[in-house]
Image (spheres, rainbow, N blue to C red):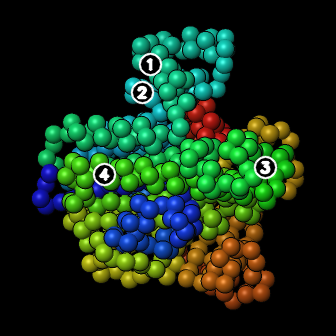
Amino acid sequence: MSEARPNIVVIVMDTARADAFSSKEPSLTPNFDTLSSTGTAYSRSFSVSPWTLPSHASLFTGMVPSKHGAHAGHKRLEQEHERLPAVLSDAGYQTVAVSNNTWLSEEFGFARGFDTFRKNWQYIQSDVDLGTIARTEEGLDKLRSVAARIFDGNPLINTANAVYGQFVRKRAEDDGAQSTNDWIRDWLARREQTDPFFLFVNYLEPHLEYKPPREHAVPLLPEDVSYNEAMAVNQDAWQYIAKKADMSERDFEILEALYQAEISYLDERIGELKELLQEEGEWKDTIFILTGDHGENIGEHRLMDHQYCLYETLLHVPLVIHGREFTGGGTVDELIQLTDLVPTLLDAVDIDAPGFREQLQARSFYPAADTASREYVVAEYMAPQPSMEALEGRVGEIPDPVYKYNRSLRAIRTDRWKLIRGSDGSVELYNIENDPGETTDCSGDKEEIRRELADDLDDWLDSFDRTEYSDGVRMKEGTKQRLEDLGYLQ
């Protein structure tokens, strides 16, 4: 391993909201807590988008969705944009990714710059995803579908992946965290390079569907609710949002317990990953980043999943960094958006990359960097995902009030205030300091503040050229089906 530069490990806990890591007795996240106390914890870190594809595109490029162009209106991160893995590779890093979310694959532009990009839903890496058939069809229909596609590519690989999806992955107790760590263990053991490495991991926990191991869930459930009863509660977000499924406060109490159990289980796997790095002698010279790509609504704002809004439940994410100058840094309360990780890491490993830095919409918060704190953070939701058409295709006719979600949104947030503005002319203003749950819209009472924030948002939008693509992105049928398995209606 290089003496000059440390390893970098970036862990994204898919759908992890910040308040899931608040102090609890007893602690549900001892490994996260230890990293927070021995590294640096950032209490006010925010995603720039509420769902996976645009959020990760921003994390890799240091740009907001309207500049990198990857969002619900164009579901691909195009190759014209430079990204962090490629810059690190050019600087001598071995670059490796393990993805458990289908959005994060070469099909959507995320493999560039990685020496190895593992799609962890496959046993043998392939462009053909027959695991979808194994998950979604039964009996003779399954056999017919597999037979129809088995020769699309390499028949042996396709068969292995179909069997893996049916008999291994589908029946696993988690969404891939264990097999992810198993693969990383093997990779670390056989790794021969002396160069430092950049390891990116997307753990799918705690993404819907919540299915935590029983031993993590039972202690958190209400005393009169069994594990089987909890798993029978509706987890179809689109049925609920379209007002096709009635859900009580009790139902959401149970779902929140399952969500917290997912977090607790994932914390255990993160601790295991840390131990793997320690066993291989890599931990002491590794910068270890733990964050979320976005949050989750569990009944808040009458929503489930992570679409259709820009509230704190979806934007406020955990962020902890351990290693080198970040060790022993305490808690930092300044505003940070996840795009800022890019220049921060470049500073931490002493990489200039002036051309890459020119594209960034970010500022370094590296401890030794001479940069001012942010006055505000921003977020964008460029188009509804799923679209109203896709939602109708899933649930049938939807009530008129649901069509209010057919809009784009932008938000600007300061220490105290937050403005959310929609393409439909809607404006919401919240006093985050006094109303962190965003329950009372102040836009009618605080006209001066609303106007000032709107002007700041407009000035920010005028400061860069936005990227627009003339057509959408076609995806393979297997990919589309797997995304819909995860709740991403197409």
Q: First in sequence, mark 1 or 3: give its number.
A: 1
Q: Give the Cα distance between marks 3 and 2.
A: 34 Å
Task: Give the residue type that dot 1 points to.
Answer: Ala
Q: Amino acid at mark 2?
A: Tyr
Q: Earlier in the sequence, mark 1 or mark 2?
A: 2
In the rendered view, would you say 412 is above or below 272? below
Q: Is residue 423 visible?
A: no
The C terminus: image quadrant = top right
**Mark closer to the chain start, 3 or 4:** 3
Q: Is residue 297 above or below residue 132?
A: below
Q: Residue at x 67, y 11 (%)?
A: 140
Identify which residue is drawn at 23% across, 49% down. 279
Q: Secondary structure at mark 1?
A: helix
Q: Position of residue 62 (x, y in %)?
A: 41, 61
Q: Distance between the Cα atoms at labels 3 and 4?
A: 41 Å
Which of 187 and 28 lies nearest the eye of the viewer? 28
The residue that mark 4 highlights is 275
Where in the figure is residue 113, as x and y percent of width and height? 31, 45
Around disc 1, counting alpha carbons within 10 Å, would you say few (fewer than 14), some (14 to 19), or many (20 or more)? some
Q: Which residue is mark 2?
A: 123
| Horizontal side, residue 95 vs residue 308: left or right | left
Q: Earlier in the sequence, mark 1 or mark 4?
A: 1
Q: Are marks 1 and 2 in contact (CB under 8 Å)?
A: yes
The residue under label 1 is: 160
Left or right: 134 with respect to 445?
left
